[in-house]
Image (cartoon, grey):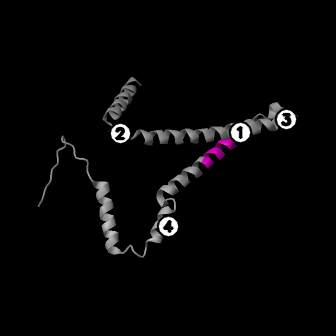
Amino acid sequence: MKNINKLLLTLLTLILTTQTVFAQSNDAVQGLVDDSKNDLLIVVGGGLAGAVLGLSTLSFVEEPKEHTRNILVGASIGVIAGVAIVAYTQANKSREAIYGTGREEAFLRRDTKNFDTSRRVSWHSSETQQKLNPIVSPYQLNFSFNY
């Protein structure tokens, strides 16, 4: 057992020390944390609301002790509903990221007649140049091979 613990500790240390760390902007991380907090709040709130509804059913039965299971059932249904709401909102956020908000399509529909092949090629090259301009550092070493 001690050998297995030593092996796991060594493996965990190796994994944690060799992982690449990516720097992220503080805004992106803060947005992710805020979204996660909101999602967690929705799920927990759904569970609490379901538990309260399950608790409220105990006043309608003769022996409340025999029906305390209603609290857990209500909480479970509330958590499931909360997860469904979070999944739906996340799916819509992904949909907007993939398909856009609709403003892009209106712009393209408006200017489709004048957007011929040559303009499309020039637009594409200007867009890729803007996105692919490398940040050159004085400490950077670049290699170029030509055949």
Q: Earlier in the sequence, mark 4 or mark 3?
A: 3
* Disc with the residue nearer the chain's start (3 vs 2): 2
Residue pictured at 39% horizontal, 41% vertical = 25
Q: Which residues are magenta?
A: 75-85
Please, what is the three-letter code of the amino acid marked with disc 3? Ser
Residue 23 image label: 2
How many marks on residues? 4
Point out residue 82 in the picture as x, y percentages from the top left corner: 64, 44
Q: Is residue 49 above or below residue 115?
A: above
Q: Dot 3 corresponds to which residue?
A: 59
Farthest residue in the top direction? 2
**In-front residue for pair 29/7:** 29
As helix, strand or loop, the secondary structure at mark 3 comes to helix
**Foreground disc of the pair 1, 4:** 4
Residue holding disc 1: 49
Name the magenta segment's main secondary structure: helix
Disc 3 residue crowd, few under 14, some 14–19, many 20+, Cα 10 Å = few
Q: CA distance from mark 4 to mark 3?
A: 57 Å
Identify the residue at horizontal 38%, vertical 30% (top origin).
8
Residue in view at x 80 percent, y 37 percent? 56
